[in-house]
């Protein structure tokens, strides 16, 4: 098997520092095992760095690690480094994967360590010393979607920047129009910031069930959020908001050609012909938000939150929304749904109506 000890250790070679040689061989074996599982290079590199960090903390080699070392490290992560629960859980998971790889008989590392050093690795991650997953959402509790009033205010302000640039004859009218449309697309299709920046013109397509949208009836998101270590996930998002489709049609047909780069495939392009980057989306969003005096907790991702929340309030099927935003588990929707008081009151009235009929 990829990563096995007999594939990484060269027999008959005497090392000056056998402990270091064994540890390096273990990491090589683990790397090859992860490569065989088609994990991304960045994920593998980050995991290796964490293992080396733990080795430095313990100041001993994996065949001497114990659950007590894990307890001490966890205490430092939470009480001294003040890491979030999700980060601590991620670190625990990485250590669990590495130690389970070492103690798996199929890879032969326990036997190799016992032959070389008279001891062997043991499991150090257990239920009582690792952080469990108790909540669906552990992010910033201040994060929230736009209210409908805030959203309309934000879009109106973005449109006003286009009118102001045209009226004064200054540069930036095309960029302002692009950004106003971009924010509407994030909300209108429930996208993430990076997904939006990576869109190309050809990513829009027809939906036979919605001919009124023409060639903008569906959106092929090719750079969706990946699972850990995996390539980006693709999904098709159906167009549901006719006003958002109208905004894109106007931008594509009347504004984007004025940038003057017909060979650029990107949907959102800069004045110099490049692809608009996620950082630029953040900068323009924060400029508009701060100019309006809106709350700092509103970020570009809040537009995606708003998409889920507002569709839920409008009575759209929850399973359909889950497919639209690319969530495999319905529990993940709890992160995004913050229905309004009016919706909750209406739902309460529907629930009570049979009792008072």
Image (spheres, helix red, strand yellow):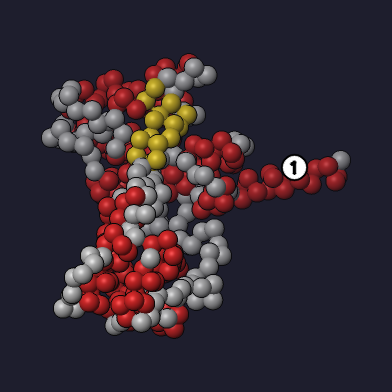
Q: In which quarter of the image is the N terminus?
A: bottom left
x and y percentages locating residue 126 in the rendered image: 51, 73
x and y percentages locating residue 355 in the rendered image: 85, 46
Q: Residue at x 29, y 26 (%)?
A: 201
x and y percentages locating residue 8 in the rendered image: 27, 62
Vertical comparison of 295 with 305: above or below: below
Left or right of 80 on screen, residue 175? left
x and y percentages locating residue 99 in the rendered image: 40, 69
Which one is nearer the viewer's eye here, 284 or 12?
12
- Answer whether residue 287 is visible to the viewer in this image: no
**Dot 1, how many residues are within 10 Å of its Cα: few (below 14), some (14-19), or many (20+)?**
few
Vertical comparison of 106 with 352: above or below: below
Q: Residue at x 26, y 65 (%)?
A: 9
Q: Mark 1 points at which residue?
A: 350
Vertical comparison of 115 with 49: above or below: below
Left or right of 328 on screen, residue 276? left
Classify residue 58 by image quadrant.
Answer: bottom left
Which one is nearer the viewer's eye here, 122 or 295?
122
Which one is nearer the viewer's eye here, 151 or 261?
261
- Answer whether residue 351 is visible to the viewer in this image: yes
Q: Which residue is drawn at 44% across and 39% down?
A: 190
Classify residue 222 by image quadrant.
Answer: top left
Vertical comparison of 317 with 336: above or below: above
Q: Which residue is drawn at 45% across and 32% down?
A: 237
Q: Tag 1's secondary structure?
A: helix
Considering every residue shown, the one lying at the far left of the view is 272
Q: In which quarter of the image is the C terminus?
A: top right
Q: How many marks?
A: 1
Considering every residue shown, the one lying at the far front of the view is 12
Which one is nearer the viewer's eye here, 246 or 70?
70
């Amino acid at each position: 098997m990829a990563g096995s000890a007999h594939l990484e250790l060269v027999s008959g070679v005497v090392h000056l520092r056998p402990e270091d040689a064994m540890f390096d061989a273990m990491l090589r074996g683990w790397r090859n095992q992860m490569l065989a599982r088609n994990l991304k290079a960045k994920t593998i590199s980050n995991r290796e760095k964490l293992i080396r960090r733990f080795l430095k903390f313990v100041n001993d080699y994996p065949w001497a690690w114990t659950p007590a070392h894990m307890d001490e490290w966890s205490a430092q992560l939470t009480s001294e480094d003040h890491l979030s629960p999700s980060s601590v859980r991620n670190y625990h998971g990485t250590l669990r994967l590495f130690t389970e790889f070492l103690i798996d008989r199929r890879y032969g590392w326990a036997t190799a360590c016992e032959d070389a050093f008279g001891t062997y690795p043991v499991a150090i991650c257990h239920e009582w010393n690792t952080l469990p997953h108790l909540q669906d959402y552990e992010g910033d509790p201040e994060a929230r979607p736009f209210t409908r009033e805030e959203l309309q205010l934000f879009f109106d302000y973005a449109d006003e920047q286009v009118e102001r640039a045209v009226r004064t004859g200054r540069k930036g009218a095309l960029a302002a129009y692009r950004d106003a449309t971009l924010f509407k697309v994030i909300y209108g299709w429930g996208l993430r910031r990076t997904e939006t920046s990576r869109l190309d013109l050809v990513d829009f397509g027809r939906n036979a069930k919605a001919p009124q949208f023409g060639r903008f009836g569906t959106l092929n998101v090719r750079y969706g959020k990946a699972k850990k270590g995996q390539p980006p996930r693709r999904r098709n998002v159906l167009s549901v908001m006719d006003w958002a489709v109208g905004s894109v049609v106007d931008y594509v047909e009347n504004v984007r050609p004025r940038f003057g780069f017909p060979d650029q495939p990107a949907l959102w392009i800069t004045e110099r012909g490049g692809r608009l980057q996620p950082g630029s989306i953040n900068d323009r969003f924060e400029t508009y938000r701060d100019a309006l005096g809106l709350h700092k907790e509103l970020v570009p991702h809040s537009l995606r939150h708003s998409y889920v929340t507002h569709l839920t309030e409008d009575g759209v099927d929850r399973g359909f929304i889950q497919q639209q935003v690319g969530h495999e588990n319905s529990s993940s929707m709890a992160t995004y749904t913050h229905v309004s008081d009016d919706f909750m009151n209406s739902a309460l009235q529907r629930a009570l109506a049979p009792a008072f009929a």
